Image: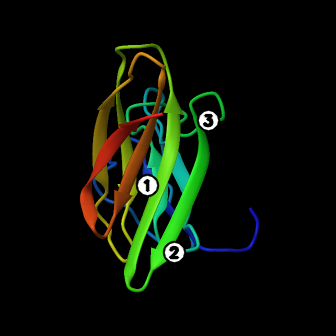
């Protein structure tokens, strides 16, 4: 991975995110395994964790146009999600300094693209038709 700060979580335990520089792996048996997701911390402290229910939480096929903003002490981030009209999606974000993600639920509009937004002034997030 390139230089920078990252956060990670075990796919079956998305409720807790860690910023430790190493990932501790436990011994696995024949029928169990661990899958860890790693996300870069963006320039203003937010991290896009993606869709917590997916094996690949962030992909180019689903997301594009990731943007951040900082205005004084207020920070925000947004990403465009694409999918079929009517599909319900959940997108997880990690706020600066937090270890608990915020999940924003959206329904794909008629145009099949939605901007998923979050910020210190919008801590629960929102969905805006693109």
Q: In terms of image quadrants, where is residue 64?
A: top right
Residue drawn 42% across and 86% down?
A: 72
Residue drawn 55% across and 34% down?
A: 56
Image depth: mark 1 or mark 3 in front: 3
Q: Is residue 26 visible?
A: no
Judging depth in this view, the residue of 25 and 101 nearest the camera is 101
Q: Is residue 20 above or below residue 73?
A: above
Q: Are marks 1 and 2 in contact (CB under 8 Å)?
A: no
Q: In terms of image quadrants, where is residue 22?
A: bottom right
Which is nearer the N-term, disc 3 or disc 2?
2
Between marks 1 and 2, how big is the CA–CA gap? 20 Å
Residue drawn 46% across and 50% down?
A: 49
Farthest right residue? 2
Q: Which secondary structure, mark 3? A: loop
Residue receiving disc 2: 44
Residue receiving disc 1: 9
* Whole-percent x, y for residue 27 in the image: 48, 48
Q: Is residue 102 visible?
A: yes
Judging depth in this view, the residue of 91 and 70 nearest the camera is 70
Q: Which secondary structure, mark 2? A: loop
Q: Residues within 10 Å of mark 1 (few under 14, many from 20)?
A: many
Which is nearer the N-term, disc 1 or disc 3?
1
Q: Quadrant of the N terminus?
A: bottom right
Between marks 3 and 2, how big is the CA–CA gap? 21 Å
Image depth: mark 1 or mark 2 in front: 2
Image depth: mark 3 or mark 2 in front: 2
Between marks 1 and 3, how big is the CA–CA gap? 17 Å
Q: Which secondary structure, mark 1? A: strand
Q: Name the disc covering residue 59, or none.
A: 3
* Whole-percent x, y for residue 87 in the image: 37, 17
**2 sits to left or right of 11:** right
* Whole-percent x, y for residue 88 in the image: 32, 23
């Amino acid at each position: 991975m390139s230089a920078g700060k990252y956060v990670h979580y075990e796919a079956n335990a998305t409720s807790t995110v860690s910023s430790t520089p190493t990932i501790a792996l436990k011994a696995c048996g024949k029928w169990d395994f661990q899958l860890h997701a790693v996300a870069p911390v963006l320039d203003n402290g937010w991290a896009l964790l993606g869709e917590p229910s997916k094996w690949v939480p962030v992909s180019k096929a689903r997301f594009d146009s990731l943007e951040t903003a900082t205005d004084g002490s207020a920070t925000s981030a947004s990403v465009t999600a694409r999918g079929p009209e009517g599909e319900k999606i959940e997108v997880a974000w990690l706020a600066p300094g937090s270890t608990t993600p915020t999940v924003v639920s959206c329904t794909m509009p008629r145009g099949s693209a939605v901007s998923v937004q979050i910020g210190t002034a919008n801590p629960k997030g929102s969905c805006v038709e693109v």
